[in-house]
Image: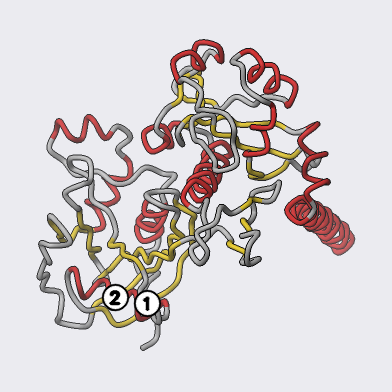
């Protein structure tokens, strides 16, 4: 038995080392591509490109899911030539990741005009016909993508949007220049470097021990309830942001616990920081700030567990029952965590 355990432990250590080694080499490869324009341009030769048009990714329908097709550099060059475009446009692409075999992945928007581009945007209908797909709004398609494509396209859209909105230096007013990977922009006149940024957002599931607090905004789809969320203010700590945001919208909380985080591309690239929080004893009365929320209410463990088991939100709308954010959203994971362990937000005072 001890021999078996020893072998098992050694095997576990070996595979842990292999996994760590792969992650480190992949991370350092991406770092090299971000810092070295020549290395990045070389990686494009064997890399794969995801295409966008005005921030909408090219997707193809496959049964009940969407798939994001990849294109080689040669295919992309042929496509641009067919539509009378200069291959220099490829330099507007951004690096969004790589495989474990170091195949670099890039994203290129054919509908946006950069300050350095000599080409006009390509017409969407003609491109869709040629590419046998559709440029779809990412928000609508996100939950019908596999995890890999959803993550890559979210990163790609966020980077492409950031570059589109930061083509000029805020100090000099002069055009900025992106590096090959798109990991930064530099003002040639004063050498100021601009890096893509995310706005921190706290998303909090409040509990009183046996119930959790869910709310909805008027912009939500009909019948959908979620955890409370809001942007962090300058100068705030994470804990201060949670307490202020929940107090602004409904009530006061006392104890909180960090859960997880997630990049969210909407509306302008946010870092969602998920937390559990508990209310003060005897202070569970809700006072909804109608300037922030349309409604908020306490829901029992059974009600929330039942909502998690429902698969079709459209059926729920027709039945008049509430539904929760899809699985890919961190709000769903936060709510599921509470259902599976209702006391997970309980911390020592």
User: Which residue is drawn at the image coordinates 49% and 54% (left, top)?
Assistant: 263
Q: Is residue 222 above or below residue 64?
A: below
User: Which residue is drawn at the image coordinates 69% and 47% (left, top)?
Assistant: 181
Q: Which residue is mark 2?
A: 278
- The spot of residue 296 in percent (x, y) is 15, 59
Q: Quadrant of the N terminus?
A: bottom right
- The spot of residue 16 in percent (x, y) is 79, 57
Q: Is residue 343 above or below residue 264?
A: below
Q: Which mark is residue 74?
A: none
Judged left or right of residue 312, residue 107 is right
User: Which residue is drawn at the image coordinates 35% and 56% (left, top)?
Assistant: 335
- The spot of residue 177 in percent (x, y) is 63, 51
Disc 1 is placed on an element classified as: strand
Judged left or right of residue 95, residue 258 is left
Q: Residues within 10 Å of mark 1 (few under 14, many from 20)?
A: many
The foreground one among 160 and 123 is 123
- The spot of residue 91 in percent (x, y) is 68, 38
Q: Which residue is mark 1?
A: 256
Task: Name the quadrant containing residue 312.
Answer: top left
User: Which residue is drawn at the image coordinates 82% and 54% (left, top)?
Assistant: 25
Task: Name the quadrant containing residue 298.
Answer: bottom left
């Amino acid at each position: 038995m001890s021999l078996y355990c020893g072998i098992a432990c050694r095997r576990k250590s070996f595979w842990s080392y292999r996994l760590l080694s792969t992650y480190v080499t992949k991370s350092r490869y991406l770092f090299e591509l971000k810092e070295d324009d020549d290395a990045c341009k070389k990686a494009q030769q064997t890399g794969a490109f995801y295409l966008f048009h005005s921030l909408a990714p090219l997707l193809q329908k496959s049964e009940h899911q969407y798939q994001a097709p990849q294109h080689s550099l040669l295919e992309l060059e042929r496509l641009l030539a067919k539509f009378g475009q200069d291959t220099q446009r490829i330099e507007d692409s951004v690096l969004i990741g790589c495989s474990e075999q170091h195949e670099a992945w890039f994203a290129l928007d054919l509908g946006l005009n950069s300050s350095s581009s000599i080409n006009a945007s390509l017409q969407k209908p003609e491109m869709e016909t040629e590419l046998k797909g559709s440029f779809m709004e990412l928000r609508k398609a996100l939950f019908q993508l596999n995890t890999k494509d959803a993550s890559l396209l979210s990163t790609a859209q966020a980077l492409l949007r950031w570059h589109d909105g930061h083509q000029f230096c805020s100090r000099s007013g002069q055009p900025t220049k992106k590096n090959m990977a798109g990991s930064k922009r530099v003002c040639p006149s004063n050498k100021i470097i601009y890096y893509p940024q995310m706005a921190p957002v706290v998303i909090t599931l409040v509990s009183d021990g046996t119930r959790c607090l869910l709310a909805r905004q008027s912009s939500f789809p009909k019948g959908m309830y979620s955890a409370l969320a809001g942007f962090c203010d300058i100068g705030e700590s994470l804990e201060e942001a949670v307490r202020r945001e929940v107090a602004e919208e409904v009530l006061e909380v006392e104890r909180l616990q960090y859960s997880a985080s997630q990049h969210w591309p909407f509306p302008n690239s946010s870092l969602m920081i998920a937390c559990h929080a508990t209310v003060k004893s005897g202070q569970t009365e809700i006072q909804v700030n109608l300037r922030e929320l349309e409604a908020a209410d306490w829901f029992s463990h059974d009600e929330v567990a039942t909502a998690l088991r429902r698969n079709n939100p459209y059926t729920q709308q027709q039945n008049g029952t509430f539904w929760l954010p899809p699985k890919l959203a961190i709000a769903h994971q936060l709510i599921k965590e509470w259902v599976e362990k209702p006391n997970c937000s309980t911390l020592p005072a």
